[in-house]
Image (cartoon, rainbow, N blue to C red):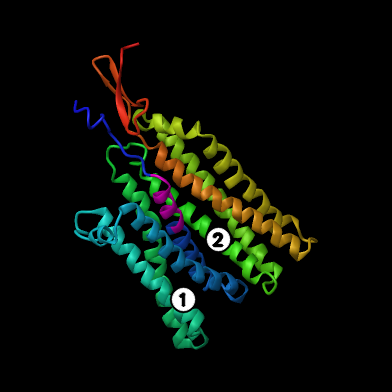
């Protein structure tokens, strides 16, 4: 073994990638909710406007985190090469196309207001449908990219893209709700917040089911089981994501939608804001936890186990040889 290589098997992606995954999911999820709500009537028009304002900027900022992780803008340009054989290249084109569509939708709907005419509404509908398709592609791409890492069984599950799509829609929804509170709370009717809270509660329930199914399937198989155990022992994941990022927002959104009929508007806004912030923090924790918990499985050879260990005073991971038990 080359001592200079230090037996390094895997480089863990850090917070730059987690931030990119989070902001990319927020942008695509917010746009998806905004585009869908644009077909649902005037009562949800505020959510459409706020969501369109969030979609493109969130993707743009997230892309800057990705470029920072790549090192130079030149590497980002090279990432789009060979889409026929590279998921990174395909994702680059999917995300770039979505960013263009979300920007066009924002300009047409908010700045030009072409939705006031029948022809304008038709154009917006076409842009919205295309935008939703590429937004879903953007949300799913990150999970597909992780799944393409064949050496990490925990990421290779077909459920990972589904989890990422659902979580992105949930965080996008929470971002819209928080934006409505901060920038349009006084002008938006309380009924709009109740509708948004009901939507959020339903989406959180779906996310809970998806993450339970993902972890259950991972734990049943021998290769990803070690990663499943790692993530379930992570206190930040269990407390920060499950309890505070899913459980508490679900309770708060159910209160707003079903149990606060006599509450004042300021109280409703406060509860929605707290629930949305907790949900967003939970979405960020989920992505970081999935990244750091994905590890190469323990190798068993001739009664010996090979594991990744951290050597003292050295920043890189190494391989340790353990005698048979």
Residue at image mark 2: 175
Q: Is residue 69 left or right of residue 4?
A: right
Which residues are the magenta region? 14-23
Residue located at (48% from left, 59% from top): 26
- Determine whether 154 is above or below 139 in the image: above
For mark 2, does the 10 Å Cα neighbourhood hold few (<14), some (14 to 19), or many (20 or more) residues? many
Along the horizontal axis of the image, is 148 left or right of 187? left
Answer with mark 2 or mark 1, whichever residue precedes in sequence. Answer: 1
Which quadrant, please, contains the N terminus? top left
Q: CA distance from mark 2 to mark 1?
A: 17 Å
Instruction: Say which residue appears at 59% left-offset and 59% top-offset.
Output: 199
Is 305 left, or right, of 216 in this rendering?
left
Along the line of sight, the residue nearer the viewer: 23 or 315: 315
Quarter of the image that includes the C terminus: top left
* Nearest the eye: 4 or 9: 4
Tell me the residue at 78%/63% (across/down): 264
Q: Quadrant of residue 120?
A: bottom left
Label 1 secondary element: helix
Q: Nearer the viewer, residue 122 or 287?
A: 287
> Which residue does the image show at 60% across and 76% down from the upper left?
42
Q: Is residue 248 above or below residue 113?
A: above
Q: Residue furthest front?
A: 313
Can you tell which mark lies on residue 220? none
Q: Which residue is mark 1?
A: 106
Q: Is residue 27 above or below residue 107?
A: above
Q: Which SS class for mark 2?
A: helix
Q: Is residue 6 above or below residue 138?
A: above
The stretch drawn in magenta includes residue 105: no
Please state the total of marks drawn on the protein image: 2
- Residue 275 visible in the current orientation: yes
Q: Position of residue 34 (x, y in %)?
A: 51, 68
């Amino acid at each position: 073994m080359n001592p200079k290589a230090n037996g390094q098997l895997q480089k863990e992606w850090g917070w730059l990638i987690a931030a990119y995954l989070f902001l990319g999911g927020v942008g695509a999820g917010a746009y998806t909710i905004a585009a869908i709500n644009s077909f649902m009537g005037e009562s949800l028009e505020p959510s459409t406007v706020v969501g369109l304002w969030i979609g493109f900027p969130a993707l743009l900022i997230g892309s800057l985190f990705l470029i920072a992780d790549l090192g130079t803008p030149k590497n980002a340009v090279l990432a789009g090469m060979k889409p026929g054989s590279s998921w990174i290249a395909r994702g680059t084109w999917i995300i770039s196309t979505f960013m263009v569509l979300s920007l066009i939708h924002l300009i047409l709907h908010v700045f030009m207001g072409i939705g006031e005419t029948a022809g304008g509404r038709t154009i917006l509908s076409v842009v919205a449908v295309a935008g939703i398709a590429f937004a879903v592609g953007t949300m799913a791409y990150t999970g597909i990219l992780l799944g393409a890492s064949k050496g990490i069984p925990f990421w290779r599950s077909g459920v990972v893209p589904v989890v990422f799509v659902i979580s992105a829609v949930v965080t996008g929804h929470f971002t819209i709700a928080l934006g409505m509170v901060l920038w349009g709370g006084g002008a938006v009717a309380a009924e709009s917040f109740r509708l948004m809270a009901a939507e959020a509660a339903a989406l959180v329930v779906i996310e809970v089911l998806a993450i339970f199914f993902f972890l259950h399937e991972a734990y049943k198989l021998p290769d990803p089981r070690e990663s499943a155990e790692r993530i379930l022992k992570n206190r930040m994941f269990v407390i920060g994501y499950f309890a505070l990022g899913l459980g508490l927002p679900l309770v708060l959104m159910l209160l707003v939608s079903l149990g606060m009929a006599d509450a004042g508007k300021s109280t409703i806004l406060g509860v929605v804001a707290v629930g949305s912030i907790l949900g967003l923090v939970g979405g960020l924790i989920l992505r970081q936890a999935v990244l750091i918990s994905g590890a190469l499985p323990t190798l068993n050879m001739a009664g010996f186990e090979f594991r990744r260990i951290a050597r003292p005073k050295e920043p890189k991971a190494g391989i340790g040889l353990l005698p048979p038990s």
